[in-house]
Amino acid sequence: MKIKEGFKLRTICGENVVTAEGTANVNYSSLISLNATAAFLFGKLQGTEFTEETAVNLLLEEYEVDRETAAKDVKALFAKWVEIGLAE
Amino acid sequence: MKMVVQNDEFFAQVLERLEDGHTATIPVKGFSMLPFIRGGKDLVVLEKATGDIKKDDIVLFNIHGKYIMHRVLRTDGKRFDIQGDGVWQGHEYPAREQILAKATKILRAGKKEVDPYTKGQLRLVHAWQHLGKLRRYILFIYRHLPWNRYWVKENYNAI
C-alpha cells in the first residue's frame, strides 16, 4: 500500500490537515483532517510502500498501546484512507 | 458587514500556495457579496493578484487586520474604491500592496463553475449596483425567505 502522490501534510490553525497539491489548484474546501496519530503515521509512511503491519509496528514504538488495539485502529484508518482516495 | 474569510493562519497558507503559482479554492463566509457570492454555499477560486487590478475585479485584501473579499468599484490604478456587492454603505480603500488575490471563478453551491467577468455577469453586476439603496430591501427579503433561514443562521457567526 502507499499514499498517493501530490498530498501534503500541513498544520493549519493547529489542525493536521492534508491538502492535495499535486494539481495546479489547491482545494481548501475539502481538506482532509487527521488526528495526531493519523498525522504521525502519514508523516512516517508517505513516500514508502507499507503494509498494515508496518503501521502497527510504528504505533507500538511510538505509543503505549497493545498490538490488538493498534491493529484494529490501523485497519479502520487505512480503509478510510483508501475510501477517500488518499492511499491505494 | 464584511465577508471575513476565516483567519490569518489560514490565509497565510493560502497565500503561500498562490505565491507558488497554484490557484486556491476557498470557502467564504458572510453576506456582503450577495447575491453574487453566497457565504457558506459558494466557493471561490483565487489567483495571485499580479499586474493591474481593474474595475469589477473581485479581490481579496487585508485591511485593518482583516481579510476581506469585495469588488472594485473604481480605480485609477493606484487608489482603489472597493465595496461588497451586498453592501449599500461602507467602502474600503486598500493600497495596491494590500490587495493579495483576485477571484477568477465562483463555484456556485461548490459545483457550478461561473466566470464572474463575462459580459453577461458584469451586466448583472452593474444592474444590481444601479439599484443603490434598494439592494438593502431586496437582500432583507432574500435573507428572510423561509428556505434561506438555516443558511442565514449558520452564517451569522461570520459577521
Image (cartoon, coloured by chain):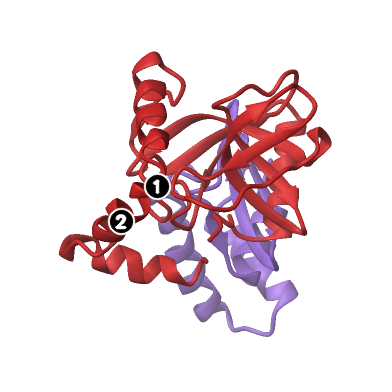
Chain colours: A purple, B red
Element under label 2? helix
Near-viewer residue (A31 or B147): B147
Residue B16 seen: no
Confirm or deny contact between disc 2 and disc 1 (CB under 8 A).
no
Q: Count numbered badges in the picture.
A: 2
Q: Is mark 1 on a helix, strand or loop?
A: loop
Q: What residue type is labelled 1?
A: Leu
Left or right of B144 in this view: B78: right
Q: Where is residue A44 in the image (x, y as percent from the top left)?
A: 72, 55
Circle 1 sits on which residue? B34
Q: Mark 1 lies on which chain?
A: B
Q: Residue at x 48, y 72 (%)?
A: B157
Q: Is residue B17 above or below residue B63?
A: above
- Does residue B92 appear in the picture of this structure? yes
Work out which residue is located at the far left of the displayed protein and give it: B146
Residue type pointed to by label 2: Tyr
The residue at which mark 2 appears reads as B137
Closer to the eye: label 2 or 1: 2
Instruction: Categorize mark 2 by other alpha carbons within 10 Å: few (<14), some (14-19), many (20+).
Output: few
Q: Which chain carries label 2?
A: B
